[in-house]
Amino acid sequence: MFESLRSHVWAYPALEVVHIIGIALLLGNQVLLELRVFGLGAALPVKALSRLSLGLALAGFSVVAASGLLMFASQPAELLANRAFTP
């Protein structure tokens, strides 16, 4: 499985796109919730919006965690050599 991520030209970039979509799901809906809490969109009920926001955030986190682990597992030596991954 990890070999296919390394051998196909578009596999890793497609996984990066999925990772970024997960980040957008995780953080994007939180921005909307914060705008509602600060007074924008007063017609929307906060309780229902927060329930929806939590579900989207959990879905986004799941996508980010899965795609991040796959990206890391496909080339761990190269990523561990990166200073961003070392203390």
Image (cartoon, grey):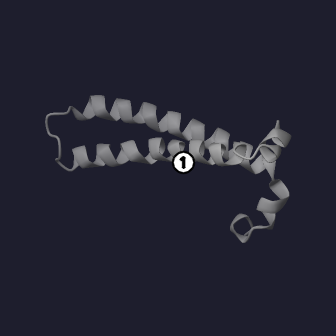
- Is 31 on the left-hand or right-hand side of 60? left
Q: Which residue is mark 1?
A: 20
Residue 26, how many percent across, how many down? Answer: 47, 43
Q: Nearer the viewer, residue 19 or 87?
A: 19
Residue 85 vertical placement versus 68 (above, below): below
Residue beneath the point at 46% across and 41% down: 25
Point out the residue furthest to the front here.
9
Identify the residue at image location x=77%, y=60%.
Answer: 79
Instruction: Give the camera-side residue of 54 and 79.
Output: 79
Q: Is residue 45 above or below residue 85?
A: above
Instruction: Please identify the quadrant where the N terminus is shown.
Output: top right
Q: Amino acid at mark 1?
A: Ile
Q: Is residue 62 above or below residue 86?
A: above
Q: Position of residue 41 (x, y in %)?
A: 17, 41
On screen, residue 30 versus residue 46, left or right, reads right
Tell me the residue at 14%/34% (across/down): 43
Image location (x, y in percent) of residue 21: 51, 43
Q: Is residue 4 left or right of residue 22?
A: right
Question: In this rendering, is residue 84 above or below 8?
Answer: below
Label 1: which secondary element: helix
User: Which quadrant, please, contains the C terminus?
Assistant: bottom right
Q: Residues within 10 Å of mark 1 (few under 14, many from 20)?
A: some
Front one among 14 and 2? 14
Residue 22 x/y as whole percent = 53, 42
| Residue ID at (81%, 54%) | 76
